[in-house]
Amino acid sequence: MSKPFSTLIKKMPAESRERIRKKTIALKKEMALADLRQARKLTQAQLAKNMKVNQVAISKFEHQSDLYLSTLRKFLAGMGAELKVVAKFPEAEITINQFSSSKSVKQKAVKTAKVKTKKVLRPQTTKKAKVGFKAAQGPRKRPLEQKKAHG
């Protein structure tokens, strides 16, 4: 007959139990997304409903090793959490507020994200076979295509 785990733990030396307790606390602070979702007692389907995506998308998020911060923020928000980005230096930890979800930071980001569009430049040949550039003004026919079209 097997013994309950709690009985085994009670028989361990105090320093072993303390080491296990510290390791448990450390492991709870670092989790993969799937483990975090499960610890929050959420199924992929429930989280998908919260995020307004399908369950397959949740599975893909959980198995990716490289996510956009915006995707991670949405994933965590679906579980009721807020994303906090912290840079750890030897002398200090700095919270990066550029990725904050507060309105003032978003408004600043929108203002700075407005970029003037530039004209697309296409190569243009002249009669002397020099190559120059001019702004694109729609589809351009090649010289051979133009000759065939006219003659």
Image (cartoon, rainbow, N blue to C red):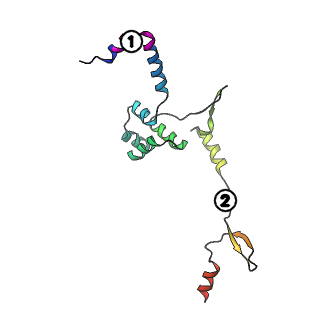
Q: Based on the displayed image, in which of its 4 quarters is residue 40 positioned?
A: top left
Mark 1 surroundings: few (<14), some (14-19) or many (≥20) residues within 10 A:
few
Q: CA distance from mark 1 to mark 2?
A: 69 Å
Q: Hey, what amino acid is under mark 1?
A: Met
- Residue 123 percent location from the top left of the image: 69, 70
Q: Based on the displayed image, in which of its 4 quarters is residue 16 positioned?
A: top left
Q: Is there any visible trace of residue 52 in the rendered image?
A: no
Q: Hey, what amino acid is under mark 2?
A: Thr
Quadrant position of the C terminus in the picture: bottom right
The answer to whether residue 135 is left or right of residue 23 is right
Q: Residue at x 49, y 23 (%)?
A: 26
Tag 1 near tag 2, CB within 8 Å? no
SS class, disc 2: loop
Checking the image for residue 117, the label placed there is 2
- Residue 131 percent location from the top left of the image: 73, 72
Checking the image for residue 74, the label placed there is none
Quadrant position of the N terminus in the picture: top left
Instruction: Between residue 7 and residue 44, name the one nearer to us.
Output: 7
Instruction: Between residue 2 and residue 94, name the one nearer to us.
Output: 2
Secondary structure mainly formed by the magenta segment: helix
Checking the image for residue 12, the label placed there is 1
- Looking at the image, is 148 positioned above or below residue 54? below
- Closer mark to the observer between disc 1 and disc 2: 1
Q: State the extent of the magenta-drawn residues as a range.
A: 8-17
Q: Residue at x 39, y 46 (%)?
A: 56
